[in-house]
Amino acid sequence: EGCARGQLLVEGTCLTRDLVNEPPAAKTPRALAAHARRLAGRGVTVRVFDERDCARMGMGAYLAVARGSAEPPRMIRLEWRPPRPRGKVVIIGKGVTFDSGGLDLKPSDGMRWMKDDMSGSAAVLGLFSILSRLAPPVHVIGLILATENMPGGRAFKPGDVLKAMNGKT
């Protein structure tokens, strides 16, 4: 039993590592959403929200980060709900699939590794890839806000006032 559980954990960890190691063009917000959709089934549900959905929810700060990119953002909600859950856990993974710094560009040496800014979202996807087989007696919700932070004519400018979902600016 311990070996089988260990094998599952290794599987989830390897998926996480592989996603982080992918080049940025292979793990765009839409690519992460497609990957999440493939995890649906066997007790896991997936819902993907596009930029219009996020605007309706008042996610101004998130959408501002996405504005400079040609790649549209995707908010991803994954859920595992066992028959009689003994509690609830929410896991949130940062999903900035590439962070150039927007108009406030990062130095080129540091920018090389900004493809790793989505490692939190990769961890959520790695977990959900094995969750139905682990079958914990806990309701688990995974949230990923996937976006790119790129320079562009629509990018938010340093000093802009952005409004988040909670109303804070």
Image (spheres, rainbow, N blue to C red):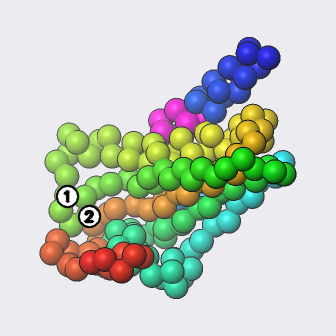
Which three-letter amino acid code belongs to the residue tagged 2?
Answer: Gly
Image point (77%, 38%), residue name? 135
Q: Which image quarter is the N terminus in? A: top right
Q: What is the magenta range?
A: 15-21
The residue nearer to you, when weighing 24 against 139, is: 139
Q: Judging from the image, what secondary structure is the residue with disc 1 in? A: loop
Circles 1 and 2: CB atoms closer than 8 Å:
yes
**Residue located at (29% from left, 42% from top):** 112
Look at the numbered disc 2 and give the secondary structure of its residue. loop
x, y percentage for residue 59?
Answer: 43, 76
Residue under the point 51% across and 77% down: 54
Q: Amino acid at mark 1?
A: Leu
From the image, tell me which residue sits under label 1: 105
Residue 153 horizontal side relative to residue 45, left or right? left
Examine the residues drawn in magenta and state their main secondary structure.
helix
Q: Residues within 10 Å of mark 2 (few under 14, many from 20)?
A: many
* Percent coordinates x, y for residue 67 in the rendering: 37, 74
Cα separation between marks 1 and 2: 6 Å
| Relative to 21, residue 159 above or below | below
Q: In the picture, which quadrant includes the C terminus? A: bottom left
